[in-house]
Amino acid sequence: MSATQVGPARAVTTAPPPRSTAGRAVRHAWALCRRNLVQMKTEPMQLFDAALMPMVFSVIFLYIFAGAIGGGTAEYRAYLIPGMLVETVIFAARSTGVALNHDFSSGLMDRFRSLPVSRSSVLLGRVGTDACRMLFGQLAMLGFAFLLGFRVRTDALALVGAALLLLAFGTAVAWVTACIGLTVRSPQTVDTAGFIWMIPLQFGSSMFVPPSTMPGWLRAFAEVNPLTLCCDAVRGLLVGGPVMQPVLGTLAWTAGLTAVFVPLALRQYRRRP
């Protein structure tokens, strides 16, 4: 009987678990974003609450200050409403930091960390949810502006371009507030801090009045203020005027804020207990 030769035994190795990929992070982020949006069905006003304060500002400035600021309601309305659209995405971006801070305080983040999801997807899902709120807020604010008599003087393509520019810039600001919300411990402090640092940017810009009417030192600040560039870009796209320079400036600020604050927010998320 011939002997059967048996080869040397091979070591059985277990393949390491696959690393998180960009596609996997996007899928997880979309699932978390969809979860947040579904939860808003019980409180649909959360989709439009970012537009409430800009609506109030529009009425106050248009019917109380228009005569003193803009020389008349019709002329000032065309100047003010694009700024209020920028204000809408800024208000929506403020809630990103507050929501993230509240999720840590309530223990929800501990549940997310126990799930097999990439860490970046949790932040991406939150920012994605607020980007949807920015879009709904723009629609609500624009509809309210039409009721006030505002009209787009360009074309549909320029209107879409303005909406996309607002969405990109608002998302970049959301990453700034996310970093603040992950650094500060108290949700109330996050809300206060977010309100304080945005006030100088809003009133020291072309949102309400032209920078040419400001004192020299304030005008110098307003001209480099990213909100001024965004307001001027949206104004040019909706009612006419210079477009190229403010659009490029807004995109530059958007890219810069995103490049700086996305890594900072991710680092704060990993370091926060």
Image (tube, grey):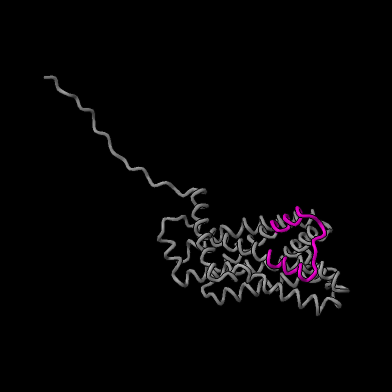
249 and 220: which is toward the camera? 249
The reply, left or right, for residue 216 in relation to residue 249 is: right
The image position of residue 94, as x and y in percent, is: 62, 69
Q: Quadrant of the C terminus?
A: bottom left
The reply, left or right, for residue 81 in relation to residue 96 is: right
Q: Residue at x 85, y 70 (%)?
A: 74
Q: Residue at x 76, y 78 (%)?
A: 60
- From the viewer's perspective, is residue 200 above or below residue 233? below
Span shown in magenta: 139-165
Magenta segment, principal secondary structure?
helix
Q: Outermost residue toward the right?
A: 71
Q: Is residue 221 visible?
A: no
Q: Quadrant of the N terminus?
A: top left
The image position of residue 61, as x and y in percent, is: 78, 76
93 and 151: which is toward the camera? 151
Q: Is residue 9 visible?
A: yes
271 and 149: which is toward the camera? 149
Q: Residue at x 44, y 70 (%)?
A: 107
The image position of residue 71, as x and y in percent, is: 88, 74
- From the viewer's perspective, is residue 242 above or below residue 192? above
